[in-house]
Amino acid sequence: MGKKDDDGRVHLYVCTGGDCKDNNAKKLRSRLKDVVKERELKERVKVEECSCVGRCGKGPVVVVEPGGEYHERLKPRDAERIIGAVVS
């Protein structure tokens, strides 16, 4: 994973490997990006795709950096909550 950019953004890494891929990870990533755009948070939050994070069976998984916080078994409808949590 990564760390905060020099500009201070939080990164949301969406696992798109293994089980996550089979459980709509791409739709989750798309919705997270939409919420960031809708809330005009591009300067604070960056959504990225990553390969397997080793939590197969608990996907889709999002890892928040900095901090390494894992969010598991997510659905696209959870995007608002995740974004809210990282910008509060």
Image (cartoon, rainbow, N blue to C red):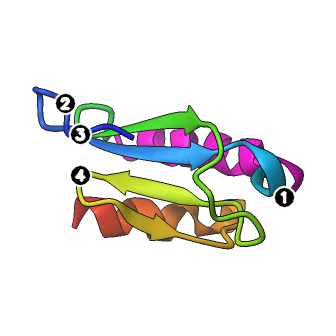
- When asked about the image quadrant of residue 20, the answer is bottom right
Farthest top residue in view? 6
Q: Which residue type carries mark 4?
A: Pro
Q: Which mark is residue 2?
A: none
Task: Give the left or right position of residue 23, taking residue 60 as reference.
Answer: right
Disc 1 or disc 3, which is closer to the eye?
Answer: 3
User: Marks 4 and 3, how far apart in space?
Assistant: 5 Å
User: Marks 1 and 2, how far apart in space?
Assistant: 29 Å
Q: Which residue was labeled with disc 3?
A: 3
Closer to the N terminus: mark 4 or mark 3? 3
Asked if the residues shown at circle 4 and circle 3 are in contact, with their CB atoms under 8 angstroms apart, the answer is yes
Q: Which residues are magenta?
A: 21-40
Q: Which residue type carries mark 3?
A: Lys
Q: Which residue was labeled with disc 2?
A: 5
Question: Dot 2: few (<14), some (14–19), or many (≥20) neighbours within 10 Å?
Answer: some
Task: Give the left or right position of residue 4, taking residue 13 as reference.
Answer: left
User: Marks 2 and 4, how far apart in space?
Assistant: 9 Å
Question: Dot 3: few (<14), some (14–19), or many (≥20) neighbours within 10 Å?
Answer: some
